[in-house]
Image (cartoon, helix red, strand yellow):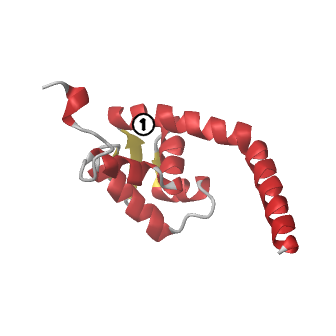
Amino acid sequence: MNQALKYNIYQQHCPARLFFEKIADKWVLLIINVLARETQHFNLLKKSIQGISPKVLSQKLKMLERDGFIERQVQNTSPIRVDYSLTSLGYEVAKMAFQLKDWAESNIEKVISAQHKFDSASKQENDLK
């Protein structure tokens, strides 16, 4: 069977939709981007991604490991340290994530400008009512 026809993301029960749900999460994209640069342990990841709570970081790491995007390696040190790194599948996703990151950083001023323009027009419209 042709792989292109096996799954159709526009179908309600297509399992590929789950990928979009997960990858659209800001924390997932940030974790993948950080790990694409280098392997990191939990606390370093937490410091690298400002604003993420330990609970959320732990949840997202488990999800990414389950989906095959990252792997964890327990270091036999005292205290025990766990390092996280991307798998080959994770590096494929990281390429797309970097493109999104670069696009967002390059275009956020245009988005903010559009928001201000929209909000101003909406305010004027509401003032006329």
Q: Is residue 120 visible?
A: yes
Q: How many labels does the image show?
A: 1
Indicate the quadrant where residue 79 lies: bottom left
Residue occupied by mark 1 = 93
Where 99 sits versus 78, above or below?
A: above
User: In the shown orientation, is residue 33 left or right of residue 78?
Assistant: right
Residue at 28% across / 47% down in the picture? 11
* Quarter of the figure that contains the C terminus: bottom right
Instruction: Tell me residue 19's x, y (percent).
Output: 35, 47
Residue 73 appears anywhere in the view: no
Q: Quick one: which residue is furthest to the top in this view?
A: 2
Check the image and name the residue furthest to the left: 1
Q: Nearer the viewer, residue 76 or 59?
A: 59
For the N terminus, the image quarter is top left
Foreground pick, 93 / 74: 93
Is 91 situated left or right of 108 in this image? left
User: Which residue is more in the foreground, 118 or 70?
Assistant: 118
Considering depth in this image, is 119 or 82 the residue closer to the camera? Answer: 119
Residue 52 x %, y %: 56, 64
Amino acid type, callout 1: Val
Query: Where on the picture, by quarter, is residue 92?
Result: top left
**Residue at the (46%, 66%) spot, across then down:** 56
Write the residue at 27% across / 39% down: 8
Q: Tell me: residue 74, above or below residue 110.
A: below
Secondary structure under tag 1 reads helix
Q: How crowded is mark 1: few (under 14 residues within 10 Å), some or many (20 or more)?
A: some
- Residue 104 spot, x, y in % from top left: 66, 42
The spot of residue 71 in percent (x, y) is: 32, 45
Taking the spot 34% from the left edge, 56% from the top edge, the residue there is: 63
